[in-house]
Image (cartoon, rainbow, N blue to C red):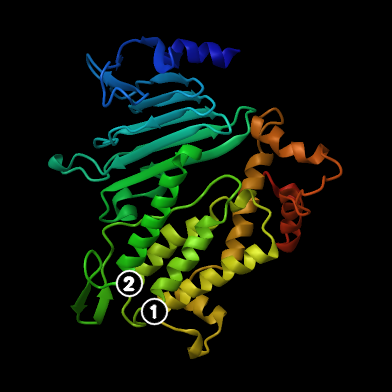
Amino acid sequence: MGNEQEDKEMEMGSIVVEKVGGRSSVVHCFSRYPVKFIIPKKVGSSRTDVVWVYALNYGGGIVSGDQILCKFSVGDCCTMVLTTQGSTKARVGSNALLAIIPDPVTCFSTARYYQKQVFNVSSNSNLVIVDWITSGRHESGEKWDFDLYRSINNIFLEDGEPLFLDTMSLEKEKIGCIHELVQDYQVIAMILLLGPKLQFVQNLVQDKVKGIMSEQLQHPSGALSHKRNEAGYFISKPSLMASCSVFGTKNQFGHIWLESFYKSIETRGRKTRNANFMISAHSNLYKPAMLYGTECWAAKGEHKNKLSVTEIKMLRWMSGHMRLDRIRNDDIRERVGVASILEKIVESRLRWFGHVRRRPTEHPVRKVDEMEDGQGVKGRGRPKKTIHEVVKRDPHVNGLSIDTINDRAQ
């Protein structure tokens, strides 16, 4: 009750869209300083059933320390497009479509920016989210010079079950120089597509991403070109690095795409790699994509084997060796200097388990985690192996004890 009252006091704006006369219409619109909503009557074709909402700030604008909370409700079978950025809570009704397409966030030097968006959807709701940030104000010489950028996007089903939980955090105090981490790239973006109405677009994006990345690492022309230096040939960094994965019940696309991606680039020359760039790409792109969600995933032996095979293919390609060279996998991994993907899975699983167990007993995450303990006999079709059973074996394998959960040094 206290949180609801606090949210009500912080609320800067709210919009409710419902069906009126067979068309999507705004039935409630509220905003206060420094936020203002503009809802034009004519946007696009009159045959298109959609409500466009433009969010502005006026007066002194948004300054350091300001907090903005907005709530949006899109009724069943309605469509709404919002162009804004800030802290947003939205409910998307059955068969409804909500598209949030803002301008990119551009942080000035020493800025600290925090953004949270929470969406409550039905099983057949449709949602488009574009969340992106630029490196800063180039004309002022600022490139990744801010102190903190944190963007949270959470999607929940009607019964409160989490469907998608994502946080992008760039904090100078924790990771050091942000510019060194992202190197010469100027934009970081996430595009999320959810719902049956967007199935065609989802398939199109997956094919495009796979094709673009495979082409950049297959062909020497274009964004990825060969350059000669004293040491020979090396591959310059691609102008675009992208990955694509599916969340929800079908969770294997990321691995399938990566495996085909490695297979397509494996045919390139064996001694033409920039080692530092390849190791950086493995640490910052390939490995996080393979490990995404594994902390809550009871991986079977089949899954572990596929991930291990995919990883060793990449490591051999990075080191310039093939299977015909008859070099052991452990020797390849030692030369490259990376830990096994299976060890990283156990590490992320134990880290998350300790994080959950250190929460208070009344914390929502702790309650969800303990629901499994009281389920009793598993029904037909339920997986025989659960995440709890796997986690309980992990400390034994690593010589740890459950009693050491509160020791962060372990």
Q: Are marks 1 and 2 in contact (CB under 8 Å)?
A: yes
Where disc 2 sits, the SS reads helix
Instruction: Specify whether residue 229 is in view.
Output: yes
Tag shown at residue 218? 2
Q: Looking at the image, which residue is at 65% across and 40% down? A: 356
Where disc 1 sits, the SS reads loop
Place residue 222 in its image quadrant. bottom left
**Of 113 and 193, the residue lying toward us:** 193
- Measuring from the top left, give residue 394's x and y in whole percent: 71, 58
Asked if residue 23 is positioned above or below residue 98 in the image, the reply reads above
Q: CA distance from mark 1 to mark 2?
A: 8 Å
Amino acid type of disc 2? Gln
Residue, far left: 139
- Image side of residue 387 versus residue 136, left or right: right
Residue identifier under label 1: 267
Asked if residue 142 is positioned above or below residue 394 in the image, the reply reads above
Sooner in the amino-acid sequence: mark 1 or mark 2: 2
Instruction: Specify whether residue 400 is in view.
Output: no
- Measuring from the top left, give residue 389's x and y in whole percent: 77, 52
Amino acid type of disc 1? Thr
